[in-house]
Amino acid sequence: MLFTAPVFLFFFLPAFLALYFALRGRRNAVILAGSLFFYAWAEPRFIFWVLSSAVLDWWLSRLIAGAPRQSAKRAWLTTGITANLALLLWFKYANFLYGSLLAMCARAGIGPPPLAHIALPIAISFIVFEKITYLVDVYRRVANPANDIFSYLTYVFFFPKLLAGPIIRYHDIEPQFHTRAISWESMRSGIARFVLGMGKKVLIADYVSRISDQAFQLQPEQLDTCTAWLGVLCFTIQIYFDFSGYSDMAIGLGRMLGFRLRENFCNPYIAENFTDFWRRWHISLSNWIREYLYIPLGGNRKGSTRTYINLCTCFVLSGLWHGAAWHFVIWGAFHGMMLMADRLFWRDLQRHVPRPANVAITFFLVMMSWVVFRCDSFRQAENYFIALFVPGRSAPNLVWVSPDIALMLTMGLLISFAPLLPRFMQLQNVYGALRWRPLAELLACFPVFLIALAKVSVSSFQSFIYFRF
């Protein structure tokens, strides 16, 4: 069930909110029931697996907390992590691993039987990450185990962040299950944030996706340099506004219910280097990688060589987390190498380079990484890079950019780079202090919502990009 789908906007959400505000003493039960229904609507056959896994986590967390010896705590933690990774490996990576085995066997003249296609449950990666986080935090005594299974299930299935994050730690949200402020201001800001995210997704990301999809689907002999550059620029805007739009909608829904979810994006395309980029892009994933992978591997505490190995390992695994394909691994390895370059020399050199140049260089390299991310294979990525940098390889293939698409692409670029404008922060602070700002934002929501709704009503289905992960 998409946040932008009419069934969500006009049936699920109104009914859920009506029950939520009517049953004041049972609001957590309403959240759990609504979240289970939300997940089962899309994946009824997989809800048993996720429920069973969550029950196992809750039981293991209590064993971890109550174990008298550290060895026993470690054993129960290992059991929980192994069970969660097994779930992820089977559903997300079995076909990928078996396909790689088939390719190697084919070269050797061996033909093992094919593996039946395994369907991927929605949000499996985000769910597994949060479940592992919970077990590790209980083991580290950063968090106490959930008092009851229903509290833990509410955390796992909390529908605003269920499908594509942000990734939330149990002890960050657990106090809000017991005490949270629900007011007119939280509802107003939640509605404004939700509509902002809907506008980013439907009115910018979905519009520019027409060009990016067309460019990346062209055959090599049809892809000219101009189309290739336009395609990757559109995808760069598409993936940011699509993913950050979902995060805005999730944060907005949380605020309507009285919850404060952490931010997941902070103007990533004005980053001056890749270290800065990963502080701004998918912040919850960056924090997860640092706290639950990079630091346990040794972080930067064991010398420069080990630090660089840890960085590359973390981002190779991050690439694999994004998708079960080798081009995602290469995408992750590229980001790991750029983070190494930051530490080795680039952050020192860029002190002598104007900020706009640093931003432009980083943005260009990020765009190149999106080529690998968007392509379906190495061969397609190779052909796309050739089209980008070898003019005249194919005859011009003019892509019709309609005025509405051109407008949305321009708006996407302006929004992405507006923070670079002089005195932008001062203007933002002045705007934030205006007494009429809350009312103006709420009034502005209506035309944005109506236009986005009209677009959804007449357009074909377009899922959020990160649903596949």
Image (tube, rainbow, N blue to C red):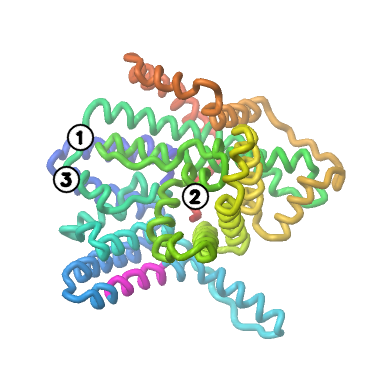
Q: From which residue to which does the magenta span run?
A: 76-87
x and y percentages locating residue 149 in the rendered image:
20, 60
Task: Identify the image quadrant of residue 121.
Answer: bottom left
Q: CA distance from mark 1 to mark 3?
A: 10 Å
Q: Residue at x 32, y 64 (%)?
A: 48
Q: Is label 2 in a helix, a strand or a loop?
A: helix
Location of mark 3 (residue) = 178
Q: Which mark is residue 466?
A: 2
- Indicate which disc, 3 or 2, sits on the residue closer to the N terminus: 3
Query: 59 left or right of 402?
Result: left
Amino acid, disc 1: Ala
Towards the viewer: 120 or 291: 291
Q: Is label 1 in a helix, a strand or a loop?
A: loop
Amino acid, disc 3: His
Location of mark 1 (residue) = 181
Q: Height in image: 428 above or below 96?
A: above
x and y percentages locating residue 171 in the rendered image:
25, 52
The crowding category of the residue bearing disc 1, from other C-alpha atoms within 10 Å (few below 14, some 14 to 19, many at least 20), is: few
Q: Height in image: 335 above or below 235?
A: below
Amino acid, disc 2: Tyr
Magenta stretch, overall SS: helix
Q: CA distance from mark 1 to mark 2?
A: 30 Å
- Indicate which disc, 1 or 2, sits on the residue closer to the N terminus: 1
